Image (tube, rainbow, N blue to C red):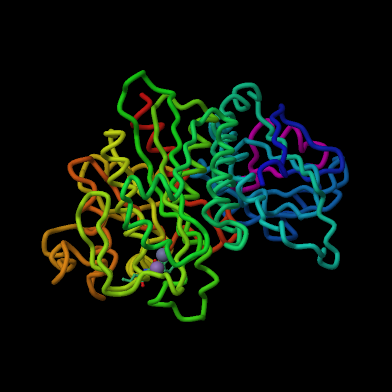
Amino acid sequence: MAGALKIGFSSFSAPENGVLAVFAGPDLKFGPGTRALLAPAADLIARAAAADGFKGKSGSALDLIAPAGLKVSRLIVIGVGADKPDDAVKLGGSTFGRAPATASEIAIMAEFPDGPLSPDQAADLALGAVLRSYSFDRYKTKKKDGDDAPKQRRLTIGTAVPDKARKAYGSREAIAEGVLIARDLVNEPANVLYPEEFARRAATLKKVGVQVDILDKKALTRLKMNALLGVGQGSIRESRVVVMRWNGGKKGAKPLAFIGKGVCFDTGGISIKPAAGMEDMKGDMAGAACVVGLMHTLASRKAKVNAVGAIGLVENMPDGNAQRPGDIVTSMSGQTIEIINTDAEGRLVLADVLWYVGKTYKPEFMVDLATLTGAIIVSLGQEYAGLFSNNDKLAERLVEAGKLSGERVWRMPLGPEYDKQIDSKFADMKNTGGRNGGAITAAQFLQRFVDKTPWAHLDIAGTGMGSPQSDINKSWASGFGVRLLDRLVADSYEK
Ligand code: BES
Ligand code: MN
Ligand code: ZN
């Protein structure tokens, strides 16, 4: 988890026997700090660039091993074209990724050809590198041949303003930890991470000042969360709901609420899923993982807001006691639900948690995250999460936060025509609306449990796990949502 990469900030300097990464533009143009640092090897670099046809184009790099005149073991010159960086987090990730895995000392100079990066951008480079450096290898007991990667790696960001950059890194460190916490939870297998264990891990947030309450089966029964309990009744693992609270805002100010689907494993239940790929359903708690990571981030950086995080933790199993298609359950809201397909379980879990949070905390808004439908992957692939909302302002803010964080969301429609699809012959509603518009009818179902509260639903089935590897993530789990929602909070609710 967090900690394998140590971050430092210093003035421009080259690490002895370490890897030095610098940015260059067209015609091998360097910023002044970088140029001074590389002066002893200027001729060598120019000759190597000419020999390799390196022109400083964005995306290209020149790799020099043990360059004469410098004390570094390797110099990596990274082309950035003529532009300023538009996404320093991504750049930090891709730059760090160019250093060999065996390097223990790495330095990146936070300077572009036409000038220094801002303290925020320098800190973003470090954030990107930390996200990139993550790997989940807890269960690898054998080293691969030639695998002599150091246990502890150090990254130094060179800048003319190390104190300012270090300060800017404070909130990024909290974000990095939150993302890595979420990734760890999603990568963890379901024999280890079942509802009770998930709840225990969420409870470790007490260390950073989050209040954590665990509702056990008895408490959930008393609250009449029968939609949620119905999903878990086929499992020998008991269901849990965890409520996390961070009070960094004004006393009495309405909290922001974040709700996560935490299906620790989704077999589909009696409507069992096909075998191929079912192992991925250990990640069906990515929404809940994001909420835990986010609460960690908000508390660690002492965000000036009141926030509630609530997660519904269940395991969806087929069993003699499992819920059947045709069963009718009465949700906490009093609305009845006919179960058509036991594999449409996430919405049943969220129905009760949304209702509970809405009525108990009367939040400013509710945002839920869920690996809810395969249909959203058909719609948007793995590039955007699906966004559904009853509130244009909230939706716009989420879209904007998505653009700025790189965790993009695409708004999808809601409407009475879709809502009709989930009317039931026998109960107030049914839990599936047929093949057409599957992600939308799932969202319509959730909307029946949010009343008038401003609400947004993020379907992260495509983005939370198994997403394509990127500059800032080489792991199966992405931790999607932590950076997006931290950004939403920071930009729209702390000012
Ligand atoms: N957890 C799944 C959705 C999912 C699929 C997440 C693939 C990540 C990757 C969800 O519980 C589910 O099974 N949804 C069904 C709903 C259907 C039965 C109406 C689906 O999408 O097929
Ligand atoms: Mn399912
Ligand atoms: Zn599911």
Span of residues in magenta: 21-41
Name the main secondary structure of what is drawn in magenta: helix
Looking at the image, in which quadrant does ligand 1 appear?
Answer: bottom left
| Residue 9 point in image, percent of width and height | 69, 30
Q: Is residue 165 above or below residue 448?
A: above
Residue 245, quarter of the rendered image: top left
* 79 to 327, vertically: above or below: above
Q: Is residue 50 left or right of residue 186?
A: right
Q: Identify the residue shown where x is 82% and y is 65%.
A: 142
Name the outermost residue toward the top.
251
Task: Indicate the position of residue 72 as horizontal and vertical percent values.
Answer: 84, 43
Q: Is residue 146 magenta?
A: no
Residue 138 image point, x, y percent: 71, 56
Of the pair 57 and 292, the residue shown nearer to us: 292
Q: Quadrant for the C terminus, please.
A: top left
Q: In which quadrant of the rendered view does residue 141 lie? A: bottom right
The answer to which of 122 and 177 lies nearer the viewer is 177
For the point 68% across and 60% down, which residue is it? 53
